[in-house]
């Protein structure tokens, strides 16, 4: 779960610095905003999901959608 572009950038940089960027190909990235999604898309995720509204409670909506 990425709540901001800043935390997303930190995570992406951390993976890249440690040559672990490929491990996300089997993981879904859940993003609170489009700006966070832009950053995480620098890696090849299985899926990047963006909350329909930038509210934390909407992040739970992902789990309701995937049932």
Image (spheres, rainbow, N blue to C red):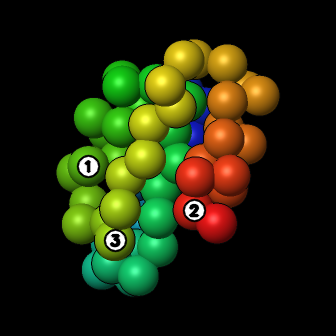
Q: Name which of mark 1 and mark 3 comes first in the sequence.
A: 1
Circle 1/circle 3 CB separation < 8 Å: no
- Residue visible at 57% across and 62% down? 66
Let me know if residue 4 appears in the view.
yes
Residue 58 relative to residue 18: left or right: right
Query: Which disc is residue 46 wearing?
Result: 3
- Residue visible at 73% across and 27% down? 56
Query: Which disc is residue 30 wearing?
Result: none
Residue beneath disc 1: 41
Q: CA distance from mark 1 to mark 3?
A: 10 Å
- Residue visible at 35% across and 62% down? 47
Please tell me whether residue 5 is drawn above or below residue 16 in the rendered image.
Answer: above
Circle 2/circle 3 CB separation < 8 Å: no
Residue 35 relative to residue 44: left or right: right
Q: Name which of mark 1 and mark 2 comes first in the sequence.
A: 1
Quarter occupied by the C terminus: bottom right
Per the image, label 1 sits on a secondary structure element best described as loop
| Residue 15 at x, y percent in the picture | 42, 66
Query: Which disc is residue 66 wearing?
Result: 2
| Residue 10 at x, y percent in the picture | 49, 43
Q: CA distance from mark 1 to mark 2?
A: 21 Å
| Residue 60 at x, y percent in the picture | 73, 43
Per the image, label 3 sits on a secondary structure element best described as loop
Write down the quadrant of residue 23 in the picture: bottom left
Q: CA distance from mark 2 to mark 3?
A: 14 Å
Let me know if residue 6 appears in the view.
no
């Amino acid at each position: 779960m990425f709540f901001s572009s800043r935390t997303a950038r930190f995570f992406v940089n951390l993976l890249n610095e440690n040559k672990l960027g490929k491990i996300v190909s089997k993981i879904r990235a859940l993003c609170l905003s489009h700006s966070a999604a832009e950053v995480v898309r620098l890696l090849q995720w299985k899926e990047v999901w963006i909350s329909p509204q930038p509210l934390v409670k909407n992040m739970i909506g992902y789990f309701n959608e995937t049932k």
